[in-house]
Amino acid sequence: MKLAFNTWVYSSFPVWVPSYPLDETIERIAKIGYDGIEIGAAAPHAYPDYLSTERRRDIKQLLQANGIALSSMLPAPGGGPGFNVSSPMPEERVAAIDQYTKVIRLCAELGGRTVIYVAGWQIYGTTREQAWEWSRQALSALAPIAREAGVTLVIEPTSADSNLVDDCDDALRMMREVNEPNVKLMFDTYHVLYRNEVASDYVYRFGKDLHHVHFADSNRLPPGEGKGDFLSVVQALHDINYDGYIAMEIGYDRRDVSPDAFARRALANVKGFLGSVRRDGSRA
């Protein structure tokens, strides 16, 4: 298992937290000791329309120079443009697919191979079935684009932030309905805690289709500093032979956070959990 850090807490998405340029962020996360970096596709870091060919080349070279991999990228849905793949506005759905396409291609260009799919949200007046179908159509349209780029799309249940792909069963259903080899699953422990569910259950149920993981404790604290049982999650990941990234997506929902301190604490805490894993194959 490899450890990555998400850039939201170093940027200004979705709240105006203290921000750092992407170059500075890459250098800090690499220096702290992470294997990978998960870059959000938003200003001031990596909004695709703002990155020239030269700038993209510079970012890739900076990643290589700092010995850190691009573990994954994720879109920035919401705000003015919306980019809701389940929107009742056809113009917004088209724009959302276009934005995902840009993020997929940017991710591949920077050396990444994983893009997170947020399935959108149901708008008042739209039935759940219709919103679901629009999201399924969008993901089905994006899968071959991602496959051509060598990218896997991972469906994330986002219960704390949206209302469509809400839990484990929703993510499994969406994956099975799309039925593309490069459409897999991920989950964020923060959303599982929001639902008062057991995060290790997601690991065992997703099994071989689990491709990516976000770690965040309650209140977006570093893992191990809230109410989450991360030792059981790490044990479950070991049990299914998970060899992907664990990305820390923490601290970005408020201003009173020191990004470097959160990054250091998360790394130390998760390394401690990894060191406590039982190697005999039994479940924790």
Image (cartoon, rainbow, N blue to C red):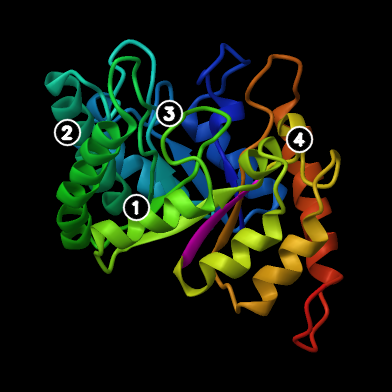
Q: Is label 3 or label 4 in front?
A: 4
Which of the two labelled residues, at mark 3 and mark 1, occupies the earlier sequence position?
3
**Residues at marks 1 and 4 touching, judged by CB atoms closer than 8 Å:** no
Relative to 245, 33 lies left or right? right
Amino acid identity at mark 1 = Met
The span from disc 2 to disc 3 (Cα, nearest Å) is: 19 Å
Q: Residues within 10 Å of mark 2 (few under 14, many from 20)?
A: some
Disc nearer the start of the sequence (2/1): 2
- The mark that comes first in sequence, 4 or 2, is 2
Q: What residue type is labelled 4?
A: Ser
Which residue type does callout 3 highlight? Answer: His
**Neighbours of disc 1 within 10 Å: few (<14), some (14-19), many (20+):** many
Element at label 1: helix
What is the C-alpha distance between the residues marked 3 and 4? Answer: 26 Å
Q: Is 269 on the left-hand or right-hand side of 243?
A: right
Q: Looking at the picture, does residue 61 appear above or below residue 272?
A: above
Closer to the camera, 175 or 6? Answer: 175
Work out how far the residue at label 3 is from the one at label 1, CA to CA, in angstroms: 30 Å
Q: Residue 174 carries which label?
A: 1
At label 2, which amino acid type do we have? Asp
Q: What stretch is highlighted in magenta?
A: 210-215
- The residue pinned by badge 3 equals 45
In this rendering, does residue 64 appear at all? no
| Residue 13 percent location from the top left of the image | 50, 21
Q: Helix, strand or loop at disc 3?
A: loop
Residue at 26% of width from left, 50% of height from top?
109
Residue 2 in the image: x percent, y percent? 61, 64
